[in-house]
Image (cartoon, grey):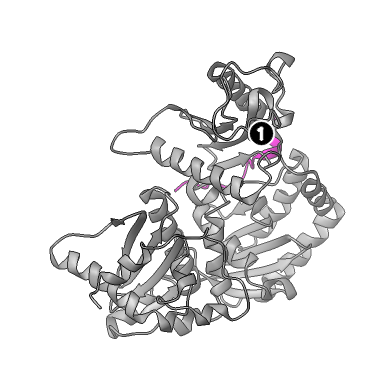
Amino acid sequence: MPKFQILQRMTSRDRRDDEPEKGKGKKNDRDDASVSWRKRKKHFFVLSHSGKPIYSRYGAEHKLAGFTATLQAIISYVENGGDNIRFVRAGKHQVVFLVKGPIYLVCISCTEEPDDALRGQLELLHGQMLVILTKSIDRCFEKNKKFDMTPLLGGTEAVFSSLIHSFSWNPATFLHAYTCLPLAFSTRQAAGAILQDVVESGVLFAMLMCKHKVVSLVGAQKASLHPDDMLLLSNFILSTKSFRTSESFSPICLPRYNPMAFLHAYVHYLEVDTYLVLLSINSDDFYHLKDCRIQIESVLAKSNVLGEVQKSVLDGGLHVEDVPVDSSLRSDSPSPHPGQGRAAIASRIGGPAGLLHFIYRSINLDQYVSSELSSPLNSSRLQKELYRAYQKLYVSMHDRQIGPHKTQFRRDESYVLLCWITPDFELYAAFDPLADKALAIKICNRVCQWVRDLENEIFLFGGSPFSW
């Protein structure tokens, strides 16, 4: 079979959405000849520079050796011509390549996501590998070009699957910012004070998290923590079941902090979804970190921080219905635009003037806050569609060739999208497709003011510097 025929075969059939593999053991039954494998909308592959498969989102790696060899041949063919391959378009598919030394990463997608967004996802996928192995894995390939690193990733399938799934729902994957759990300022200060105490005892970073949201975070002086590292670290912890069953002490690499070396992470769940992470540079710090955890747990119990965290989880975050505006801007005001396309979304359910959702990113803090997803965005399909619309808007706003831009207004059959970027913040807002432009702009101003009024509750202030 000619080398490029395998890629062509993936473009010749209709695809299902990129839902995860279902059914125990099915992944091992899939190869590139499988109809169900070819119907997937979005594939991720990791292979070595010799073409040896390392990871595949769908299918069994050992059954995809021929396919990954084809990908390697394409990369090598372009490199031999003195160029670097970035992406290929094949029908409805985009094939995006990322070369990281001896490790090649490839995404084949027909989801219509921008090339830059897919490349950013490959960067995070590579970063997740470094969390587990560090960049020193490159030396193994220098010694042996046919080195097989697959056994070193054994048991981490859930980690990569969880990260790839987050590309469809977590704004942190393209905003490069983290989000905090809404809390009273005094509660967050109480948590930060005890974390500061243990950091001063020799801990590099202390993090109190609730799922992927930060409760409090403190770092040692002159130590910086990148939001991408926080994303990869929390994904690793949340998708590894063993962390939930007992206190754990594990080597972990933070690629943006130091890609060549391991830190040592003490992880302990304090509640069902609330966990403490203490990071040290010393491999023999387990008992010291354990003592720190006991001290932290005692203070948190006395100050009722954990109770407030659980209350915040139950209350949820910001809701578009609560944006404070006068009655003339509420969503039941008639829209001057005729209906078109998906009128169901324009059912006047949501916030003022048809506001459906928003994301506010503080540039100075590298933190973001987003409203809760609610009716009419109450299906996974609509939520994924909105998320990808935000992705496209973000890439468009930050396009280096024709931008960056300050504002953008888009209207299609699904949404009105508005983006506003200033030196202090970025705002991304989605309205129903019948929304009036002038009213939408007014509401965006109200959202920004509302966020500033609540900033002590929704952002983390006063921690150690996190510049990079």
Residue 230 visible to the viewer:
no
Q: Foreground: 35 or 227?
A: 35
Quadrant of the image containing the N terminus: bottom left
- Other residues around mark 1 within 10 Å, as few (<14) / some (14–19) / many (≥20): some
Residue at label 1?
455
Residue 420 among those drawn in magenta: no
Q: Foreground: 284 or 255?
A: 255
2 on left or right of 359: left
The main secondary structure of the magenta stretch is loop
Which residue is located at x 55 percent, y 67 percent? Answer: 161
Q: Foreground: 12 or 131?
A: 12
Residue 33, quarter of picture: bottom left
Q: Residue furthest top?
A: 328
Range shown magenta: 454-468
Residue 45, quarter of picture: bottom left
Count up the numbered dots: 1
Q: Position of residue 83 (x, y in %)?
A: 17, 59
Helix, strand or loop at mark 1: helix
- Say if 327 sits above or below 287 in the image: above
Residue 464 among those drawn in magenta: yes
Residue 70 visible to the viewer:
yes
Kind of residue sitting beneath label 1: Glu
Which residue is located at x 56 percent, y 76 percent? Answer: 283
Q: Position of residue 249 (x, y in %)?
A: 63, 75
